[in-house]
Image (spheres, rainbow, N blue to C red):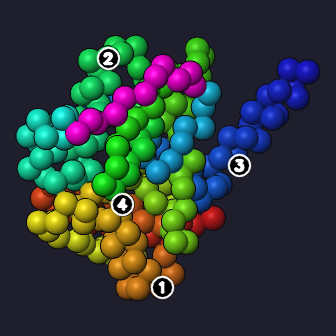
Amino acid sequence: MKKLLLASILLFSINATAQSNIATVKKIQGLYIFSDNEPISDYIVFGEISISTQDAQNDVDIKSSLGHYQAVRDFLIKKTRISNSLADGIILSLVDGGTDKAIIIKFKDNTTNKDYAKVNRQKGLYTFIDCEPLSKYQNLGSVSFKNTLSFSSNQYGGVKDVLIKKSLKEYNGANGIILQLSRGSNTGDAILIKE
């Protein structure tokens, strides 16, 4: 029985590293951040937090950035830290023009690979934000998007869509994109993940 269990774990580990949609997520301010991806390891949901209209109007960073990803993410991290000091991470749900929220999670005891996530595919590209592919990959080139004075175009969905479209147009062989979104610069690296 023990040999069978060990073989199953080893087989899962090998399969997990061979999949194009597996990523290692970053820990930011002490929390694992899952955005456009979901943890592979078992977790418990502690609750949900959201950004109210009042939060968006009162938070200087969110207001001045017109709802940019980095400002929204950092606000949700801060709000999580205040509401639940035992949290291991958050799963972001960002809606352009809607209510941005996060599910607060705690990994189950003896959980390994807390930083592994299954990444979503959008318009044919695996989308990596605040994470990197676990598999080896080739960087094909970069694309960029400048912040505008428009509220909707600075939000995560709008910026992500522009960068994905540019990657598909400029880098024909790409099967993934690594997004780096900060208030001063929104870029994406078009990548070819080796399977």
Q: Quadrant of residue 181?
A: bottom left
Alpha carbon of mark 4 to alpha carbon of mark 1: how far?
22 Å
Q: Is residue 174 left or right of residue 142?
A: right
Q: Earlier in the sequence, mark 1 or mark 2?
A: 2
Q: Which secondary structure lies at badge 4?
A: helix
Alpha carbon of mark 1 to alpha carbon of mark 2: how far?
45 Å
Q: Is residue 10 left or right of residue 181?
A: right
Q: Are marks 4 and 3 in contact (CB under 8 Å)?
A: no
Q: Earlier in the sequence, mark 4 or mark 1?
A: 4
Which residue is rendered at x = 62% and y = 27% of the image? 42
Q: Quadrant of residue 144?
A: bottom left
Q: Label 4 belongs to which residue?
A: 157
Quadrant where the image shows the N terminus: top right
Which residue is rendered at x = 51% and y = 81% of the image? 173
Q: Position of residue 149 (x, y in %)?
A: 11, 66
Nearer to us of marks 4 and 1 is 4
Alpha carbon of mark 2 to alpha carbon of mark 3: how far?
37 Å
Q: Label 2 belongs to which residue?
A: 83
Could you tell me if residue 89 is visible in this image?
Answer: no
Nearer to us of marks 1 and 2 is 2
Q: Are marks 1 and 2 in contact (CB under 8 Å)?
A: no
Instruction: Say which mark, if any, is on residue 122.
Output: none
Magenta region: which residues? 43-53
Q: Is residue 4 above or below residue 74?
A: above
Q: Label 3 belongs to which residue?
A: 15
Q: Amino acid at mark 2?
A: Ser
Which residue is rendered at x = 57% and y = 25% of the image? 43
